[in-house]
Image (cartoon, rainbow, N blue to C red):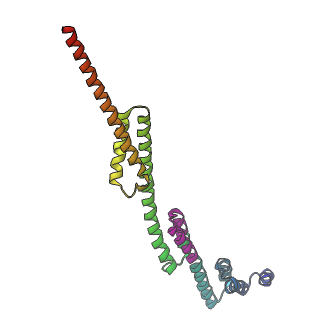
Amino acid sequence: LLDFTERIKVNPTRHQNYNTRASFYINNFEDYAKALPDYEKALVLASKPQDIEAYKKDIRRCKDRIAFGYYQTADTLFDQKKYAEAIEWAHKALALAPAGGQAANWSQELLNLATQKLQAQQQLDSLRREVTTMYAQGMKLIKNNRYPEGLKILDKVQSLHKQNVSALEPLRYMLEEIFQQKAKWRKIQNAKYLKEVEEQIKKMEEKKKNEE
């Protein structure tokens, strides 16, 4: 490698030197990223039509292999449900991949799918945040003995759970807590009612006693 680099330093306008070093990168290390700029430099320096066409093919091959590597990274991130990062790498692949090539086609398909998944994930996250916020508000009101207001909000939380069963599965603990708070409120109401009845009976008895 040092020998190839020295040749370029001695004669930087000879396109064959860049071609030789690029071939060395590919044949020994499969390093298309390092080979690409050498092929591009060789293309600029070449004058014969056959050399120009050969370098164009080499550049296309390098770009295709590099883009395919980017696609594989995007695909791995997609499998890990890291959709935003997958989209970023798919864009990198598309920016480099020759149009109409396999890497370009696969990257575009992956980009479309990752974009759909990301949008769905963002909607799901938004829904869960909304439900979590509402639940916290309702519980805070109940803690402050403002049951009617708190339960009204928790009713909305319960309704959203019914409409989005699978999406809100991780938040099912809320439903049990809501059930307990409603039961507690019923006990409070019943106790209040019984107390009112007892007070009314007591008044009636006192009234009757006074009349006698």
- In the rendered image, residue 104, in percent from the top left (x then y), is placed at 50, 76
Question: Image point 44% across, 42% down: which residue?
Answer: 136
- In the rendered image, residue 93, in percent from the top left (x then y), is placed at 55, 72
| Residue 46, quarter of the rendered image | bottom right
| Residue 204, quarter of the rendered image | top left
Foreground residue among 100 and 50 = 100
Q: Tell me if residue 80 is in the magenta stretch.
A: yes
Visible residue check, residue 36: yes
Establish if 196 lies above or below 123: above
Segment tinted magenta in the rendering: 67-91
Q: Looking at the figure, which quarter contains the N terminus?
A: bottom right
Q: Tell me if residue 184 is in the magenta stretch.
A: no
Visible residue check, residue 95: no
- In the rendered image, residue 112, in percent from the top left (x then y), is placed at 44, 68
Foreground residue among 55 and 206 = 206
Q: Main secondary structure of the magenta part?
A: helix
Taking the view exactly as shown, the residue that stands out farthest to the bottom is 50
Q: Is residue 96 left or right of residue 206?
A: right
- In the rendered image, residue 199, in percent from the top left (x then y), is placed at 28, 20
Q: Looking at the figure, which quarter contains the C terminus?
A: top left
Q: Is residue 180 left or right of residue 101?
A: left
Q: Is residue 74 left or right of residue 31?
A: left
